[in-house]
Image (cartoon, grey):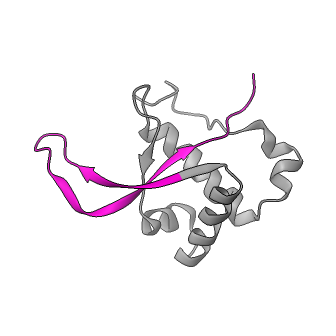
Amino acid sequence: MAKYKERYFLQVDRGVFDSDYKDLTPSACKVYFMLCELEHRFCTDDSNYFFRTNEDLAEDTGLNISTVKRAKKELVEKKYVKTFPIHFQKVATKTRSKKKVTAYRILKRGSV
């Protein structure tokens, strides 16, 4: 079940229409929107983070990997997203992956 129970909308910070986002590059906005979509798709009420590789994000957004990395750095520096390394763990076997993946947590949400 998706975190916000619906499938046909994207919830983003309302600041996207304010001056805060005018400082973001277009590629950072695109990556931010995709990360919000992925949060909606992969997070539940019990988890507030998800993971994605740079290659997956590049494919999701249509941007090249170096652009994705620059956009992620910008989003982290401006505190829109928090990233941290984790091991992917298979639930059934409880075995951890050899490589770490990047986990994401969206930090800014729209006001009510």
| Residue 76 in picture, x, y percent from top left | 63, 57
* Quarter in which the C terminus is drawn: top right
Which of the 4 quarters of the picture holds residue 36?
top right
Front residue (pair 46, 65): 46
For residue 71, side relative to residue 94 (left or right):
right
Q: Which residue is located at x 64 percent, y 35 percent?
A: 11
| Residue 7 in picture, x, y percent from top left | 51, 32
Name the main secondary structure of what is drawn in magenta: strand
Q: Which residue is located at x 47 percent, y 29 percent?
A: 3
Residue 71 position (above or below residue 39): below
Q: Which residue is located at x 44 percent, y 69 percent?
A: 55
* Quarter in which the N terminus is drawn: top left
User: Where does the magenta region start and end?
Assistant: 83-112
Front residue (pair 59, 81): 81
Residue 80 position (above or below residue 24): above
For residue 26, side relative to residue 34 (left or right):
right
Q: Give yes or no for residue 87 being in the magenta stretch.
A: yes
Residue 29 position (above or below residue 13): below
| Residue 69 in picture, x, y percent from top left | 57, 70
Which of the 4 quarters of the picture holds residue 93?
top left
Label count reads 0
Q: Which residue is located at x 48 percent, y 66 percent?
A: 59
Q: Give yes or no for residue 35 being in the magenta stretch.
A: no
Query: Going by the picture, which residue comes out furthest to the left?
Result: 93
